[in-house]
Image (cartoon, rainbow, N blue to C red):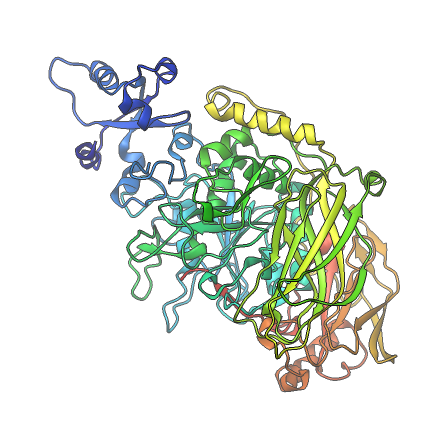
Amino acid sequence: MASSTQMCLSVCHLLLLTVSPMLSQSSSSPSRASSSCGPGRSWAVCLHAVKAGRSLEQLAQSVAEEVGLENHGQIGQLELLSDFLHLTSPHLQHNDVKQGMDVNVTGVWERSITGVGITVVVVDDGIQHTLADIQPNYSPEGSYDLNSNDPDPMPHPDGHSDNHHGTRCAGEIAAVSNNSFCSVGLAYGAKVAGIRVLDGPLTDSMEAVAFNKHYQVNDVYSCSWGPDDDGRTVDGPHPLGKAALQHGVIAGRRGFGSIFVVASGNGGQYEDNCNYDGYANSIYTVTIGAVDENGKKPFYAEECASMLAVTFSSGSRQLRSIVTSDWSLQSGTGCTDGHTGTSAAAPLAAGMVALMLQVRPCLSWRDIQHIITYTATQHDADARADWGINGAGFHHSHKYGFGLLNAWRLVNAAKVWESVPFLVSYQSPVLKANEDIPEYPKTLTHTWNVSLSDLRQSGMQTLEHVSVTVTIVHPRRGNVEIRLVCPSGMSSLIGAQRSLDVDTTGFTDWTFSTVRCWGERAEGQYTLQITDYKESTLSSGVLKHWKLTLYGSSLSHQQVKERRRVVEDAMGGQYLDRSFALPCPPGIDVPPEIVSPFTSSSLKVDATIQLVHGSIRTSVFNHGFRFGSDGWAHQSMKHSILLCSTKNILIRPNMLHNTEWSLYLLHCCSGQLGRSGNRGKDWRALGSWVHDLSRSAVARHAGLGRPFIGPHLQTYDTLPFFQLVIREISPVLMSFPASRQRADI
C-alpha cells in the first residue's frame, strides 16, 4: 500500500473496498481483513494503470479478493484527495500504528458528506481568505473585522508574526480539496468565515458582538482562545458576553441555536483547570480538549468536569502536530505542520459539527451536545485516565470528557437523532452557610435535596449540566478544593487545587459546572464537599453561601437508554447509504441583525444617580420604545437596579430577560473591575483612559442631558432575547479590556 500511495500523487482510479458482512461474521476471516476493517471502515485503493488484456473491473475484483475485502466499485479519481496525500496530517489518516487514533472521517467523505451548506466562523485574529486553500470556501457574508470596524477580516502583519492563528484554524475546518497543496479541511465542503477580534484590546461588548455576528449566516462559531492559562486566573465572559451566548443559542441559526465550540485551554503545565474558565464552564458552549496522536493527554492540556470531549492536536516534541493552512504574509508559506495546543483541537470539533449539520440541519445546540455525549469513545484504558461511569451508563473523565470525537459515529448518530425536549432548569435558594472550611483531611459538607415535587413544575426528569455557584472567602484561593456529588454517587472535581493561585479574594458568585451527571435522574440529594489544603500560617477560609442549579429535560431515564440503543444501531452506516431522512422543521424567521435600532428621537433616557446605604443605584426611565420578538415596538418600563455594593464587586443586574429592557447602566466599583487584566485596581487609575470619552460621546449617545458623574460609568444596550448592539462609538467605552490569549503553544 505504501508504494501505491506514491502513485496516487498522479491521477488514478479510486476503488472502494469494505469488509464483507459475511467475512466480518466468520471466524475464518483473513486476519489482515479483520485487523484493518470494522464497521464503518473502508479502503480507497488507487489503481494507477490497467495491464493489457485486463479490464479495470477485473483488476479491482482481484485486488479485493486478494485482501479479503468486498469491492464496491469505482468511486472517482484521486484528484479529490491529492492535497490530503501530499502532506498528511496524523488526525486525518487511518492510524494503523495505533488503531482508532484518528478522527475516522474518510468513510463520511466517501458518502459525499463534507459540510456542504454549513458555514463555520472562526472568531480569532482574522483569516487570510485570499489563500488558495481558503478562498474557494470563504464566506464574506459571515465575516467581519471588529478590530478595524470593516467587513474584511484579513489579518494584519505584526511584530511577532503571531496573527496567523485564525488562518490555521480556518484551514483545519474547510481548506479546499483537489488543489495539490498542504492538507484538506475536515469539512472541506463547508464555508468558512472570519471574525477578527483578537488583534487589539478585547472588551466585553466586542466579545458579545462577535458571538452574535451574522448569526443567521454562521452556523458554528470556533473559538480557540480564552482567559490566561496561568494557573491563577478565574475569568470568563462578562455580562454582555454571557448575554450574547444565551441569545445565540436562542435565536441563532433560525432558532436552532448557534453552536459555540471553545478550546479548554493550555494551562496544564501550570496545574490550571478549565472549570476556572467561564467559556469552558458555560452550558452554552461545546468544550473541547486535546490529545496527542497516541490518544494521550498532552502536557499542556487542562482537565475539568465541564469538558465534553477531546480530539487530536500536538504532543511532545517527538510527536507530530497538526498540518493545516497558514498565512503567506511575513515569513509564512501558506502551509504549516506545526499547529498546536487546544487551539488546533477546537476547529477539528467545529468541522465535525459541520458534517453533522449537513445530514441533519435542524439539530439544536443541545442536540449537538447530546450526540457528542452519546458517541464519544472511551479510548484510553490507562487507570490514570480517571474514567467514571455515571448513573445513566455514560463514561466521563476529567482528562478526556466523554471521550474521543469520532466523525463516523457523530454523523451516523446525527442522521437518526430526534431533537431533545425543551431545556428546563431548577434552582435552589441561596443557601447561606458562613462556615469555616476545615483543613485537609477534614471536609466541609453541605447537602441539598431535590424532590420530585420540586421538579414537577418544570417537568425535569434527567440531567444535562449541573452548576454550583459559590462565594468563598479565603486568604489563598488555590488551596481550596471543591467537589460535587450527584444523587447517583457520581463525583465531580469542580474546583481543583492550583498551587500558583495566591489570590486573596476567594470566589465571588463564581459558577462551576459539570457534565459528569449527564442523563442521570435529577431528583435526589446533591452534596457539596469543600476541603482546604492550607498552610498552618494561614487563616481558615469561609464558605459564605452557595446555590445549586440543574439543567435538563423531560427525557425519562428509560428514554435515555433507548436513545443510546438507537444511536448504536445506526453505526453500520445503513442510514447514510440510503435516502433516509427524519422530518426537519423549518425553524423560525428571525429578523436580520439591526445595526442601529435606536435614534435620539426613538430613545430618550433620563438617568439619576443616588447613593443608597453605601451602594450606587441607577434609576433608568425609558420613555422610548424597544423592538419585541414579534417585530413590533413596545413601551418599555422603569426599573431601579443595584449596580454595585460596598464590597466593591461588579454586580450583574438580574434584569436580563426578554420583555423589559432596551438599555441599562453598569458601574465598575473600586477594588475590582471585573476583568482579569485589571482586577484589584482602583477605577481612578484608569480615569484618564476613559475620561474624555465618558464626558462626551457616551453621555451624548446615552441621551443624557449632562455628562456622567465621573469617568467610571459605561453604557450597554440590549435588545429582547439579549440581542446586543454596538454603536458608532469606540468599543473601549463599553467595557474595560480583558486578557484573552490564543490556545496554541
Which of the 4 image quadrants contains residue 237? bottom right
Q: Is residue 206 above or below residue 591?
A: below
The answer to whether one can see residue 631 in this image is no
The answer to whether one can see residue 56 in this image is yes
Question: Which residue occupies the foreground of this view, 642 or 560?
Answer: 560
Q: Is residue 216 above or below residue 144?
A: above
160 lies left or right of 11: right
Q: Quadrant of the C terminus?
A: bottom left
Residue at the spot 73% in from the left edge and 60% down from the top edge: 718
Which residue extends farthest left?
52
Question: Which residue occupies the foreground of this view, 274 or 104?
Answer: 274
> Picture coordinates of residue 576 (x, y %)?
48, 24
Residue at the spot 41% in from the left edge and 24% down from the top edge: 39
> Picture coordinates of residue 175 (x, y %)?
38, 46
Question: Which residue occupies the foreground of this view, 278 or 8?
Answer: 278
352 lies left or right of 475: left
> Picture coordinates of residue 130 (x, y %)?
38, 54
Residue at the spot 28% in from the left edge and 55% down from the top edge: 318
Residue at the spot 83% in from the left edge and 57% down from the top edge: 660
